Amino acid sequence: MMKDLVDQVLAANLELHRSGLARLTWGNVSGIDRDRGLVVIKPSGVAYADLTRDALAVVDLEGRVVGGRLHPSSDTPTHLALYRAFPAIGGITHTHSVYATMFAQACREIPCLGTTHADQFFGPVPLARALTPEEVRDDYERNTGRAIVERFASLDPAATPGVLAAHHGPFTWGKDPGASLENSIALEAIAEMAFGTLALAPGIGPIPAHILDKHFSRKHGPGAYYGQKRGSPGA
Amino acid sequence: MMKDLVDQVLAANLELHRSGLARLTWGNVSGIDRDRGLVVIKPSGVAYADLTRDALAVVDLEGRVVGGRLHPSSDTPTHLALYRAFPAIGGITHTHSVYATMFAQACREIPCLGTTHADQFFGPVPLARALTPEEVRDDYERNTGRAIVERFASLDPAATPGVLAAHHGPFTWGKDPGASLENSIALEAIAEMAFGTLALAPGIGPIPAHILDKHFSRKHGPGAYYGQKRGSPGA
Amino acid sequence: MMKDLVDQVLAANLELHRSGLARLTWGNVSGIDRDRGLVVIKPSGVAYADLTRDALAVVDLEGRVVGGRLHPSSDTPTHLALYRAFPAIGGITHTHSVYATMFAQACREIPCLGTTHADQFFGPVPLARALTPEEVRDDYERNTGRAIVERFASLDPAATPGVLAAHHGPFTWGKDPGASLENSIALEAIAEMAFGTLALAPGIGPIPAHILDKHFSRKHGPGAYYGQKRGSPGA
Amino acid sequence: MMKDLVDQVLAANLELHRSGLARLTWGNVSGIDRDRGLVVIKPSGVAYADLTRDALAVVDLEGRVVGGRLHPSSDTPTHLALYRAFPAIGGITHTHSVYATMFAQACREIPCLGTTHADQFFGPVPLARALTPEEVRDDYERNTGRAIVERFASLDPAATPGVLAAHHGPFTWGKDPGASLENSIALEAIAEMAFGTLALAPGIGPIPAHILDKHFSRKHGPGAYYGQKRGSPGA
């Protein structure tokens, strides 16, 4: 199972690069083996062209390196905080993709302005607050994760599979590494469409609730009928 | 003839992906065999890389699956409503392409602001209204098609080969699957140009009627002289 | 010499497509053999992937087809009007490239806002006026060329190697087909940069005259020192 | 060592083209051998496809050509002024990349609006003033370098590895040619994100100082922990 997970994390990191969401080394995908409590993640600052199975880092849920010869991503403590708080997720993707990052830098959540959004996020893409000077000084990356978890106190991470970290950029998740990457690709498209929609219709509000409900439930949950596995969560 | 149609629908779905108009699985092309009353369409939620002739679904005009081993696109009832109402069309393309979707989300039609637009659409790209809660609850996708047909009560689908579904995105059509895809590519360019034109000249109105008439008739109808088959509808 | 010209026109049309400036069949490059008075141009409505030497059309300066088996571009009369009026040019490119077309649709010339612009255009990219109903009805494409020539009554086409046709899009020219294409590529970049500059600094005026003079003369004319052939017109 | 430097400069110029930051011939990368006082730089006006080791020019710090058969870039005197003033830098990249050039043309520095920026630039990307008529007339390119150096009177070029030349475009630098190119790639992303952030939140100020400090020091300086060589300057 770890072998499969390593393959999935490698494939998702390579696809992250091919998708154009990550310039230079600005993005990382991880995956978790819940039975063993181990997380596989991209090494820090390594070019995507140099990624191999052996280059990936393996850490436990407290951040101890237990495999791989390279340092794990500096964002690892953020990933771990999310894995600890959201027991149903199996993969996480972090990017600095352009349009999602614009909203994060503007400290604005992304309202649900259309069905593309409603198909993936049940409501706005939320914004996690900026950290205090103390939170930045001590254990910055772990506190980034804590601020995200705090924002989800009354949100379901399965229905809202991503967040904008204020001043920073997006994190998304899913049932496995590939699903978390798909949510990053979707989020970037959603953000670009929202950017333009707000330019064309500055005062526009979110779509009607009945359309949001319909589109999300069409793809997710027991009544889903999008895709080939009807009645199960959409891929 | 069905074999040709299957080839055309496959080629158009693959080109839809290559063109960059459809991220993930967000888009589908269909084609109809009018003699048999059968529609070939992309299966639901299947990656473009996995599409083959055998993966395509075949349905009749009432939506009964008569061929293929996979579920047809969840948008199939919308396609069927358009095929039933517009007897001259032979192919339909649906996308969530970025700029066309911005206008759909902003609930704004696209005014004809230049000759690129006038070459393809004889007047504005219309907006089909949002659905009521009842229309969303019961037979949502079919009602999406009905709202489009309602919008075309006084429009000619040959002269206006596409529409923006409010809060959702564009549908385009043409004499065959490839022509419907070309209209999606054209619509996305038209939308991007209109977006920028409105930013540069916020109060600008549509182009003069004599330029609209000239450009549309240059490519379409009995006096057309664009392309190699003069006097016939332009490709 | 005609053989060389055909090769150049073919190469420039293929590069036009690869450059991303022309979607579908929306663009054409031509070149002229001044000694023979013959113009080689893309055929109308033919996909770039299907272009070969034999597919190109050859016409004389009055528009009579003298070679090739396909109809020449519907924009041919515009090209011919420019070749007749501007004796020093050897190639013309027409596109509907996105940002240049936005300015054409907005009926705004592009002010010279930086050195990228000043390197290629000695002053604003001018706008040719919209045609009257009569000019559109009779000999539309030839009148498009006439309106451009009218706009250049007091402009030097060597120093201003392109124009925006109102409501339509850009035409550029140069000493040969390749140079005309380079000016289209440059114009699209200039237009995109101007679009963003005007968004960041809405009231900004053109760059100081001494910077415009310096940059244009650095690349063009007897004192040019950009490129490898110092003292000759820059490529 | 010169052989290595030539290889690095060639590779960085080719990557500059592949990255999409330089259209036509609008960009150049150089590198310096500090021991020999020699600078290797792209030749002027040569297409990237035609670049080879032998096509690169070699000049000394006073601009005398000491190697290569082609004229060096017309921007060479600007590069040399920076090498003379900033003794720790080993490579320089100049581009007309679209978003960075928009800010240069708008004569606006780029405020630090997020962690993507803070990872690369410790504070705003500064703007070097426009040159006077006299500075433009005599030794224009060298004076461009002098205006940049003047702007850095109270800035550390290691902490601020790039600048916008007013009306013109960006110059970036680094410990070697490849690092200078990475800073150009980063700057273009930063500029694009800032452009959108300012559209979404027009009055927004820079990020809090404690976040700027944290992100820059995470990647640079003795306490750096990003990447694989912990405690050394990040790549």
Image (cartoon, coloured by chain):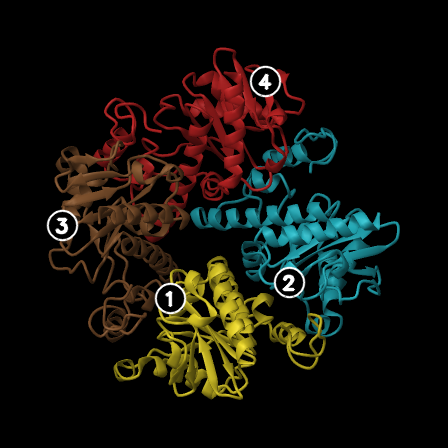
Chain colours: A yellow, B cyan, C red, D brown
Picture disc at residue A46: 1
Task: Give the left or right position of residue A212, taking residue A59 as reference.
Answer: right
Observer-side mark, 4 or 1, equals 1
Question: What element does badge 4 sit on?
Answer: strand
Observer-side mark, 2 or 4, equals 2
| Amino acid at circle 1 | Val
Any part of residue C147 in sight: yes
Q: Is disc 4 in the same subunit as disc 3?
A: no
Q: Which residue is mark 3?
A: D35
The chain under label 1 reads A
Q: Is disc 2 in the same subunit as disc 1?
A: no
The chain under label 3 reads D
Observer-side mark, 3 or 2, equals 3
Observer-side mark, 2 or 1, equals 1
| Amino acid at circle 2 | Ala
Q: Which residue is mark 2?
A: B47
Q: Are marks 3 and 1 in contact (CB under 8 Å)?
A: no
Observer-side mark, 3 or 1, equals 3
Question: Is disc 2 surrounded by few (<14), some (14 to 19) or many (20+) residues within 10 Å?
Answer: some
Q: CA distance from mark 4 to mark 1?
A: 57 Å
For this rendering, which residue is in front, A194 or C39? Answer: C39
Task: Give the left or right position of residue A219, taking residue D30 as reference.
Answer: right
Q: Which residue is mark 4?
A: C59
The chain under label 2 reads B
The percent coordinates of residue A54 (x first, y second) are 44, 71
The number of callouts visible is: 4
| Amino acid at circle 4 | Val
Question: What element does badge 3 sit on?
Answer: loop
Question: What element does badge 2 sit on?
Answer: loop
Task: Give the left or right position of residue B219, taking residue C148 as reference.
Answer: right
